[in-house]
Amino acid sequence: MKKTCINDYLNKDNIWIERILNKSFSINRNLEHVQQEYNQDKYKRLLANSSLNIREIKAYQWNQKGFKNTHISLGDEIFECTTTFAQSLVDNMVLNNVSNFSSENICELGTGYGYNLTLFDKSLNLYGGELTENGVKIGKLNNLDVSLFNFYNIQDYKLIRPNSTVFTHHALEQIPDSKCFIENLADFKDNIN
């Protein structure tokens, strides 16, 4: 990991510059778009490599994006590091934040193929809900308890078991309005620790 400066990060080759300036990046996040991007594109390609375990799938995803290095911020500083190191920081953040709660069950809503569930001790009751059929298939191929789940459908929240810690990571950004998530989750608050 090497310290860098904002000018090195914000250069003409950085895809986020145009996104930040809203010059080329406009996505209407709706169910159709999410299904296309994840179910039909990303997870379908991953399913074609079904012999890979979850960790190998995550590494494959980074490689597909062409990333070997990335930039991260720690406090007020910017560093360039390997994607593997950046992913380990994110993994530790998820693990540490969720581990602050003690429950019989840990549930991730919008779990994708279940990568985050593999961060926890296997003796815990881990399960998740996912919108895409291919995400669910990949999770099940890796012996994870992943079921179909739609943030908009209140009936899908019935998958939340009593005494569960519920978390979501990198999923709510996929829905245009998180109000439905908060309202639906509130209806099942008695199951959440």
Image (cartoon, grey):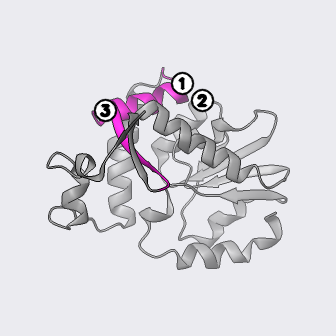
Q: Earlier in the sequence, mark 2 or mark 3?
A: 3
Q: Earlier in the sequence, mark 2 or mark 1?
A: 1
SS at mark 1? loop
Q: Quadrant of the N terminus?
A: top left
The label number, if any, that marks residue 53 in the structure image? 1
Residue 120 spot, x, y in % from top left: 71, 38
> Disc 3 versus disc 1: distance between alpha carbons?
16 Å
The label number, if any, that marks residue 142 in the structure image? 2
Label 1 CA crowd tier, 10 Å (few <14, some 14–19, many 20+)? some
Label 2 or label 1, whichever lies nearer to me, is 1
Name the amino acid type tagged 2: Asn
Q: Which residue is at 69% across, 47% downward? A: 96
- For the residues bearing labels 2 and 1, Cβ distance under 8 angstroms: yes
Residue toward you, 85 or 35: 85
**In-image side of 48 versus 165 (left or right):** left
Residue toward you, 181 or 21: 21
> Disc 2 versus disc 3: distance between alpha carbons?
21 Å
Q: Earlier in the sequence, mark 3 or mark 1?
A: 1
Q: How many marks?
A: 3
Q: Quadrant of residue 27?
A: bottom left
Label 2 or label 3, whichever lies nearer to me, is 3
The label number, if any, that marks residue 64 in the structure image? 3
SS at mark 3? helix
Q: Quadrant of the C terminus?
A: bottom right
Q: Which residue is at 70% across, 59% downward? A: 166
**In-image side of 166 versus 14 (left or right):** right
Q: Is residue 10 magenta?
A: no
Q: Which residue is at 48% across, 25% downward? A: 56
What is the span of residues highlighted in magenta in the rendered image? 51-75
Q: Which residue is at 38% across, 28% downward? A: 48
Name the amino acid type tagged 3: Gln
Residue 114 appears in view: no
